[in-house]
Image: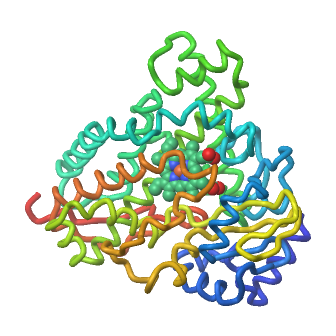
Amino acid sequence: HGLVRRTLLRKMRDGDLSAQLMFDREMIADPFPHYDVLREQGRLVDNGLVLNTAHHDIATAVLRSPDFGVVGGPSGQAPAALRFAVRAAGRGPVGPVEPPSMLAVDPPDHTRFRKLVTRAFSARAVAALRSRTEEVAEELLDEMAARGHNADLVADYASLLPATVIAEMLGAPVEMRRQFLEWGAGGAASLDTGLPYREFRRSEQQLEAMQNWMLGHFDHIRRHPADTILSALVHAHAEEGRLTEDEVASIAILLLAAGFETTVNLIGNGAALLDGHPEQLALLRAEPGRWGNAVEEILRHDSPVQRTGRFAGRDTEVAGEHVRTGQVVLVLLGGANRDPAVFTDPGRFDITRENADDHLAFSSGIHYCLGAALAKMEGEVALRALFDRFPDLTLNGPPHRRPTRVLRGYDAMPVRLSSAT
Ligand code: HEM
């Protein structure tokens, strides 16, 4: 493995673009021109480790194909290359992107896990959460306004809103939301390849801390069962023997972390984009019915999850391209969402774009984001409430990009709320 890594690092220094996209931190700020070049280089660009694609049709075909598997693989055996391409290295048993997490296993396990929680995230369940989400938004905006003219939009709002909503939804203590955010951010960093060892260890420790807390919380739930998602999961383990404790912990941690680690980026990216396009914000004020499409365009233009991976369980063909058994395809979702074959003038942010929702920001196929409806509802509620309350909101200097490659967002966004507050 060290050899593969050294080879890729050499390729990166020699100017191999796909290797650079895996390792070069300089590319994080603006990967889009590089995706464009890669797309020109080929439909599946082989860098000796993985096949890269920034083409929308291939990405869709790979994600939907039953011939491809995820990290766990059809038999639970991930090729090392996929683990390596998607994230730094293996860890303990219950990280959010390691087996038995639902993101990292294929059917039939995947089907079994997903079925347990599907209903809680349905469009109907999410619609019932909307008014509570609006209340959370107003509470956070009140607190921000009470503190004065200046705020950090990420720390004070974009992160706390989804963290509060998912904690309440799952039945995790809301007063721990800042701790969840800290653990989650640490864990999310480890999704990236090429992480310096010390950072990788730190992120691993944070995930371990979250896991330990979750297992302790399960004990609490056993003594005090309630009508919550976590309680139902623990029950499925204890009463029905449908899940092992590792599986329960893995699902719980994935739901908690996925509940805010990605939506924070949608809200932050959206705030920055709308701040930079006042004419589109004005259009939304005049015609609020456009908010739904605006959220799709934010997801397309600045996708919070930029990449995922799949490997071929057998020799196969996708969108006219041959892939051999065991080969890994790195699907650059953020690049597919800028594919000019699907989106006219793809670099332009345009909330009136008619096919904005053809994006792959939530992936596709059986792993299509379980929380997509929730995330879109939260994004719309959060951004609408923000710009309604503070119509003169302006950035107080450039926002700071989080230094992560898989997740795209900001970790700090100083703003001036408005002259009136
Ligand atoms: C899966 C993106 C919010 C829960 C995924 C995947 C993507 C994604 C790309 C699939 C990855 C792959 O195919 O390998 C996003 C984005 C979000 C968001 C961009 C916000 C803007 C949420 C929320 C939840 C959530 C709020 C709530 C708990 C999940 C779960 C999976 C998943 C459980 C695994 C589904 C499976 O493997 O079947 N998400 N997500 N996500 N997401 Fe989200």
**Quadrant of the rendered structure where residue 379 is?**
bottom left
Left or right relative to 227: residue 13 = right
Q: Residue furthest left?
A: 420
> Which quadrant, please, contains the N terminus?
bottom right
Left or right relative to 357: residue 331 = right
> Which quadrant, please, contains the C terminus?
bottom left
* Relative image position of residue 58 (x, y in whole percent): 67, 72
Q: Is residue 212 above or below residue 122?
A: above
* Relative image position of residue 269 (x, y in whole percent): 40, 66
Identify which residue, 61 or 302, lies in the foreground. Answer: 61
Name which residue lies at 63% across and 77% down: 55
Name which residue lies at 23% across and 50% down: 144
Q: Is residue 35 above or below residue 66?
A: below
Q: Is residue 352 above or below residue 391?
A: below
Identify which residue, 250 or 326, lies in the foreground. Answer: 326
* Relative image position of residue 393 (x, y in whole percent): 20, 66
Name which residue lies at 66% across and 60% down: 63
Q: How many marks?
A: 0
Left or right relative to 320: residue 2 = right
Residue 262 visible, this angle? no
Its colouring scheme is rainbow
Name which residue lies at 66% across and 50% down: 202
Identify which residue, 416 or 80, lies in the foreground. Answer: 80
Q: Is residue 111 above or below residue 360?
A: above
Residue 412 visible, this angle? yes
* Relative image position of residue 72 (x, y in whole percent): 78, 47
